[in-house]
Image: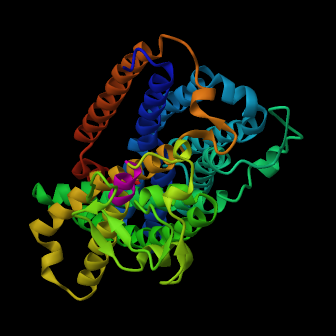
Amino acid sequence: MIFDDPVYASRMLTLLTLSFHIIYATIGVGVPLMIMIAQWIGIKKNDMHYLLMARRWAKGFIVTVAVGVVTGTAIGLQLSLLWPSFMELAGNIIALPLFMEVFAFFFEAIFLGIYLYTWDRFDNQKKHLLLLIPVAVGGGMSAYFITVVNSFMNSPGGFDIANGELVNANPLAAMFTVSMPTKVAHVLSTGYMTIAFVLAAIAAFRLLQGSNREYHKKSLNMLMKIGFVFALATALIGDLSGKYLAEYQPEKLAAAEWHFETSSEAPLVMWGILDDNNEPQYALEIPYALSILAHSWPTAEVIGLNEFPEDEQPPLVIHYFFDTMVTIGVFMLGLSFIYWLGIRRSWNFVESRWYRRLIVLGGPLSFLAIEAGWWMAEVGRQPWILRGIMTIDEAATTSDYVGIMFFLFVLLYLILGVGTVVVLRKMFQRNPIDKDIENFQGGDQS
């Protein structure tokens, strides 16, 4: 099927590229902030362990940046090659944020290079820390500009339509559409949360392997606290995102919640399956929760999916994407809160092997939640590529070779993914923490 239908093949290739790139994009957003926090704490406490965290994470980060360049370039090319009608219609509007995203990336990369090169060249480490500010800002701005493009596709604005064309385009106005604030805030908070939990999972894994280094214990404690803060922020922003959907994209919210009939006192439906009559079976229903999520009131009316034409209804599979994202988010919020509370109250079980195994599991789960969130955002916009204006069928290429390109890109991403893991593994095997501590204590901290 993927060879026969160019539209379907284009969708699958775009999904593949976005799903792979989001891993490196999340690393690009989250790691600079973790480096900056670790170095700031190290300077404040005069603690070499935190300074070493910053140095080691920065060395690994540069590898992921290199791969992120490849996957980010592929996205830009695929927009033009796979969705030519969309780019012809909206290219003059989204060109500005796409250009600014590239500028933000190079801004981040340049200062990252300066930061790494000048590690031992500052007598005052506070001056060296200042170089991390543009790195973190560049990572955040890169995420902002690319999310602006996605926001525009979900809530188009900043133009008029005349004879099927977008005229009187105002790219600045198009960058500040109604969906932008919640989308950007959600992307940033989940990026920071995910990287905190991934790095915490690495520290917990090293402790499970038998490392008794204070380096890993301090790393785990710091990252779980940071993860909790951003998990809480993500939950609050997620509530605002639900209210945005209820107001501006009610069909997506209804499909995600299998809410077919307009009703008040609407429950939140988690998991389950649909029977032949579209009735949820084996699902967990939380009374009033959907009404509260949509309108902050337990008896509020929520629009049902049946209110929309059948050909404009999003695929019902997004229900599972939503549930995956929410379930993992709640799990990580609870896991990090219990850890934070347990450390404060000296609960021994948070340092037990079984609890650390849960923390290790939280790393890949956090990335799965990121993926599920983007799948819901993109699949949930169907059948539109530009909501209310252009469908994916109208936007896609008619080339017969997209299916072949899909499998070639699968091979490319497999090579890049495995290569990243191999390079990072060899890098840290050749430079174990014991060696870095020895070098640091030997006077390398000047």
Depicted 291 relative to depicted 23: above or below: below
**Percent of width and height locating residue 430:** 24, 37
Query: In terms of secondary structure, what is the magenta stretch mainly?
Result: helix
| Residue 5 percent location from the top left of the image | 45, 19
| Residue 171 on the magenta segment | no
Q: Residue at x 45, y 55 (%)?
A: 255
Q: Is residue 105 above or below residue 203?
A: above
- Where does the N terminus fall, quadrant-wise? top left
Q: Is residue 65 left or right of residue 135?
A: left
The reply to whether residue 383 is in sight is: yes
In this orientation, does residue 446 appear? Answer: no
* Colouring style: rainbow
Q: In the image, is 12 to the left or to the right of 186?
A: left
Residue farthest toward the front in the current orientation of the protein: 277
Span colored in magenta: 317-324
**What residue is rendered at 52% in x and 67% in y?**
242
Q: Residue 177 occupies which quadrant of the picture?
A: bottom right
- In this image, 164 relative to 426: left or right? right
Which residue is more in the foreground, 228 or 375? 375
Q: Residue furthest top?
A: 400
> Which residue in the rendered view is the most extreme toward the bottom?
345
User: Residue 88's image quarter?
Assistant: top right
- Residue 181: image quadrant is bottom right
Q: In this rendered view, identify the residue nearer to me: 88 or 29.
A: 88
Q: Where residue 295 sits in the image (x, y, percent)?
A: 56, 76
**Residue 372: x percent and y percent?**
39, 50
In the image, what residue occupies the spot 41% across and 62% down?
Answer: 257
Numbered label tally: 0
Viewer-closest of 83 and 279? 279
Viewer-closest of 79 and 117: 79
Left or right, 78 with reference to 437: right
Task: Residue 322: say if magenta.
Answer: yes
